[in-house]
Image (cartoon, helix red, strand yellow):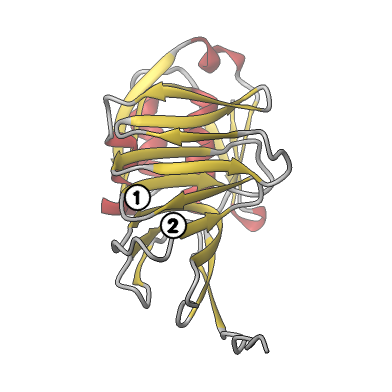
């Protein structure tokens, strides 16, 4: 006679724009959740695995337990580990999927293609390119300092930086000035400084103006 395990109650946490949350799971795993992120996890893990579901970006410092794999399930891939430190960026509604490994080892497998999987080693990032997983080395971890409340970017497009601002400040940004897209930018802001401060600093290097529509939570870059 096969004994069925009792269903385990699930906890769901959703982080608002402009905020970040630090939680500790039942096994001792430490998780940082970035803005606009939702995580679903059991109050206690079952005897076979430690499964959490993620929509957004989170940094995991996983408690070691070789008998129970730790699995982060996104809408695109599963990221399976035994004990390690890594960042997963996978917001639904975007084409982005990235897993960056700081310590240990992770296995990434597609939810839709059984043949698509890879094992990531430290200081490497797995990312989607034309619908397929690719790997490249990581030598600058400044962009993962969001856990400290920092927005960091290195040689990024203006549009990419504005996407970060949208995530952190809960606004929509429309760019009509094509000149701002010609260059790559490097910088760092504290989230608490606010979007107006960040835009004014960028204006020192880039010629643009902007208008706010606070009623509709929009900013127009002109």
Q: How crowded is the residue under tag 1: few (<14 C-alpha within 10 Å), some, or many (20+)?
A: many
Answer left or right for 2 relative to 50. right
Q: What residue do we see at 47% from left, 56% from top?
A: 35
The mark found on residue 18 in the picture is 2
| Quadrant in the picture for residue 101 | top left
How far, Cα to Cα, is label 2 from label 1?
Answer: 7 Å
Quadrant (top left/top right/bottom left/bottom right) for the N terminus: bottom right
| Quadrant in the picture for residue 199 | top left
Q: How far from the left and from the top, in percent, is residue 55? A: 58, 56
The mark found on residue 164 in the picture is none
Query: In this orientation, does residue 206 appear?
Result: yes
Q: What residue do we see at 65% from left, 40% from top?
A: 94
| Quadrant in the picture for residue 186 | top left
Question: Under tag 1, what secondary structure?
Answer: helix
Residue farthest to the front?
A: 1
Q: Which residue is mark 1?
A: 191
Question: Under tag 2, what secondary structure?
Answer: loop
Q: What residue do we see at 46% from left, 46% from top?
A: 88
Disc on the earlier residue, 2 or 1 = 2
Q: 203 or 36: nearer the eye?
A: 36
Answer left or right for 115 relative to 196. right
Q: What residue do we see at 45% from left, 82% from top?
A: 44
Residue farthest to the right?
A: 112
Q: How far from the left and from the top, in percent, is residue 158? A: 49, 24
Q: How far from the left and from the top, in percent, is residue 45? A: 46, 77
- Above or below, 33 against 46 in this view is above
- Above or below, 23 against 190 in this view is below
Q: How crowded is the residue under tag 2: few (<14 C-alpha within 10 Å), some, or many (20+)?
A: some
Answer left or right for 56 relative to 216. left
Q: 23 or 8: nearer the eye?
A: 8
User: Is there a contact, CB below 8 Å, between mark 2 and mark 1?
Assistant: yes
């Amino acid at each position: 006679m096969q004994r069925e395990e009792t269903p385990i109650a699930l906890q769901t946490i959703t982080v608002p724009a402009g905020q970040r949350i630090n939680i500790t799971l039942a096994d001792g795993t430490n998780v940082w959740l970035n803005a606009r992120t939702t995580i679903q996890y059991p109050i206690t893990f079952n005897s076979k695995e430690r499964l959490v579901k993620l929509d957004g970006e989170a940094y995991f410092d996983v408690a070691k337990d070789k008998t129970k794999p730790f699995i982060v399930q996104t809408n695109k891939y599963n990221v399976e580990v035994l004990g390690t430190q890594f960042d997963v960026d996978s917001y639904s509604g975007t084409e982005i999927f990235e897993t960056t490994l700081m310590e240990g080892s992770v296995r990434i497998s597609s939810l839709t293609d059984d043949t698509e999987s890879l094992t990531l080693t430290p200081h490497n990032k797995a990312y989607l390119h034309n619908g397929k997983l690719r790997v490249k080395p990581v030598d600058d971890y400044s962009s993962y300092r969001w856990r400290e409340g920092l927005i960091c970017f290195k040689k990024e497009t203006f549009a990419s930086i504005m996407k970060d601002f949208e995530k952190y400040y809960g606004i929509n940004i429309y760019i009509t000035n094509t000149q701002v897209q010609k260059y790559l930018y490097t910088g760092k802001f504290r989230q608490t400084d606010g979007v107006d401060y960040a835009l004014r600093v960028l204006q020192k290097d880039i010629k643009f103006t902007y208008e706010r529509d606070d009623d509709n939570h929009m900013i127009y870059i002109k």
